[in-house]
Every structure is written in C-alpha cells, then in structure tokens.
Image (cartoon, rainbow, N blue to C red):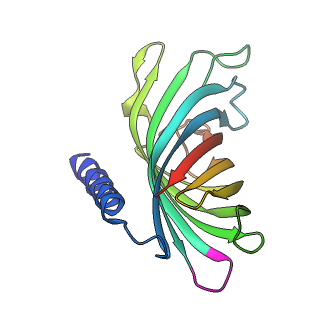
Amino acid sequence: MNSIKGSILGMAMVLIAGLTAQTNAQSPVSFGLKGGFTIANLAGEDFDADARFGLTAGAMIDISLPVVPFGVESGIYYTQKGARASDGFSGDVDLDYVEVPVLAKFRLGPPGPITPHLVAGPYVSFNINAESETGDISDDINSTEIGGAIGVGIDFNLGVTKLNARAQYGYGFTDVFKNAADGNGGKNAALSVTAGIWF
C-alpha cells in the first residue's frame, strides 16, 4: 500500500510541476484542473442498489497531435463511487478511489471557439477508502480496479484560456469485492459530469 501511495504522490507532483512550467500557449501539451459530480452504482446480478451521488476532482493533461483532430488525455483524479441501500440491497457502500485514465480524444471539427469532442479508453483506480454502515470494509475490497470509460464534451477556446465540459461514463472490468462466494463481486459503474480549465 505504501508503494501505491508513493506512486500516486509521484504522479501528482509531476502533474503539478507541469502546471507551473506550462508557459507556451502554442504547445501541443496542455495542463488543467477539473471537478464535478458523480452518480455511481454497483452493477451485477446480485446488486439492486440505489445510486450514490459523489464528487470527482483532479489534474489533467492533454497531448494534441499536429494536423489531425486526435490526441491523448490523462490525469489523476479523486473519485467517489459506491452505492446506496435499497429494497434489494442492504447498507450503504462508500468507495473512494484515485483514478488514472488514458483516453483517446477525437475532436469533432476544426479548432475554433467551440469544439466538441469524444473520448474513450481505459483507466486504473486505486481504492483509498471503503466504508459501509458497519465501518471500514477495506479488507473486503480489491485495492485496484481496471475499467473503461467513454464520454462526450466541449472545449471552449476563450483566447487567454480554455474551458472544458464533459459527461463521461465509466465501467469497471474487475470485481469490487474480494472472494465473492458466487463469483459475482460487483462492478463499479459511474456517470460523471465535470467542468475544467486548461492553462
């Protein structure tokens, strides 16, 4: 766990260093910050829970390829997932992750004041907190999650800076719970709506 935390801290320091070093507006590499809310749930045949409303926030990096309307976006984010109790699911589950996506970004149209885009790609998440109504359940949760994400957004070019808005859906490919008796450990599913600023 200490090695994971050290890696996360190292990635955060690299992103922060990039934010402070970014001075050339024409550079194909852009850095930014974004935040928003999540609507998360647990997917699986044994899970019939209500959604958990949470938060997401972090630092992002965008690498644009010259000429072609294609690039790569990544970042490091704090993201809240989990589920809420319902008639078919007993007890709230609060799951907090540090998430690192690597997304292909397709710009829909030439650069301008408003440019729509699509994103898709994998992500890896590290669980940093797991709680239920009975207390800490970290020992029952897989510490690492691998999943995929797809989203649609808009970049607003204001000249001196750029803004970003996006709706994105992520789905975990790996089980949330360890050693599920029936082999169904549940999957994280989360819709996020975010706004950000590029420097």
Q: Position of residue 178 (x, y in %)?
A: 47, 39
| Front-lying residue, 37 or 172 | 37
Prevailing secondary structure class for the magenta stretch in the rendered image: loop
Is residue 166 located in the magenta-colored stretch of the structure?
A: no
Is residue 69 located in the magenta-colored stretch of the structure?
A: yes
Please, which residue is most extreme toward the bottom here?
67
Q: Position of residue 54 (x, y in %)?
A: 56, 28
Residue at the spot x=32%, y=55% of the render?
16
Residue at the spot x=46%, y=76% of the render?
27
Residue at the spot x=32%, y=53% of the render?
12
Please, which residue is most extreme toward the front here?
159
Relative to residue 67, is residue 96 drawn left or right? left
Q: Position of residue 10 (x, y in %)?
A: 26, 57
Q: Position of residue 50 (x, y in %)?
A: 70, 22
Residue at the spot x=41%, y=26% of the render?
137
Please, which residue is most extreme toward the right here?
109
Q: Quadrant of the N terminus?
A: top left
| Front-lying residue, 81 or 183 | 81
Residue 63, placed above or below residue 91 = below
Q: Is residue 151 visible?
A: no
Residue 49, placed above or below residue 16 = above
Which quadrant would residue 120 be assigned to in this image?
bottom right
Q: Which residues are magenta?
A: 65-70
